[in-house]
Amino acid sequence: MNRSKNPGGQQRLVEGALDTLRPGWRERRAKRKSAWNLLGALLIILGLGFFWYGLWLGAWRVHIIFYPAHATHLKQFWQSGLSGAAFISSFLLVMPLIVPAIALACLASNFLMWLIPPARRAMNAEAAGDYEMTFRGANFELIKWGGIASGVALLLVLIGAATLTNLR
């Protein structure tokens, strides 16, 4: 049963936003035909989990600065019976970390792929003069936009760390 009244509406919305924010994204996507792109995507997925967990541990340590009594209560984080206020604060402590984790995972994937000479040659051939598809251009954009978005995300994490007064 299709619950959506507008099938494909979300995809059109995302594509419309990408057309506005990232002109040429369709052409760049069409150029990516190398099998090396699959390895890059796998590295991003693995890196995402690694960086998100590492950032979460760092956020927990920041939280401990505000509330040292919680230092031995990590296993009580996000347990059942959580109050609404604690849920909001803990949500802010965890979920915005996906933004810097994505940026770091993409940067790490690009770097690791660059270290493999056949992958580097294939990626350079796909770039074919498109600066945003080159190693330098892609990483510059990731650092620029990922840095801005990560700054906002880390501010939200700091708010979550400072307001999580009770783990229940």
Image (cartoon, grey):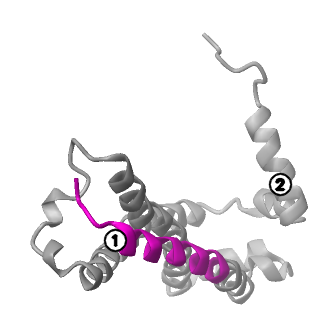
Q: Residue at x 76, y 59 (%)?
A: 29
Residue at point 70% right, 21% down?
Answer: 4
Q: Measured from the top left, where is residue 108 in percent x and y?
A: 49, 80
Q: State the SS at label 2.
A: helix
Q: Main secondary structure of the magenta part?
A: helix
> Horizontal and vertical percent for residue 44?
49, 66
Percent position of residue 7, x then y: 75, 24
User: Where residue 27 is drawn, which disc sits there?
Assistant: none
Q: Is residue 5 left or right of residue 135?
A: right
Residue under label 1: 56
Residue closest to the eye, 99 or 29: 99
What's the distance in space between the residues labelled 1 and 2, CA to CA?
30 Å
Name the side, left or right, on which 7 lies relative to 153.
right
The range drawn in magenta is: 146-168
Residue 17 is labelled as: 2
Picture quadrant of residue 143: bottom right
Q: What residue is at 77 percent from the left and 48 percent from the top?
A: 14
Secondary structure beneath dot 1 equals: helix
Horizontal and vertical percent position of residue 124: 72, 80
Q: Dot 2, crowdedness within 10 Å: few (<14), some or many (≥20)?
A: few
Q: Does residue 109 show up?
A: no
Residue 37 position (above or below residue 11) = below
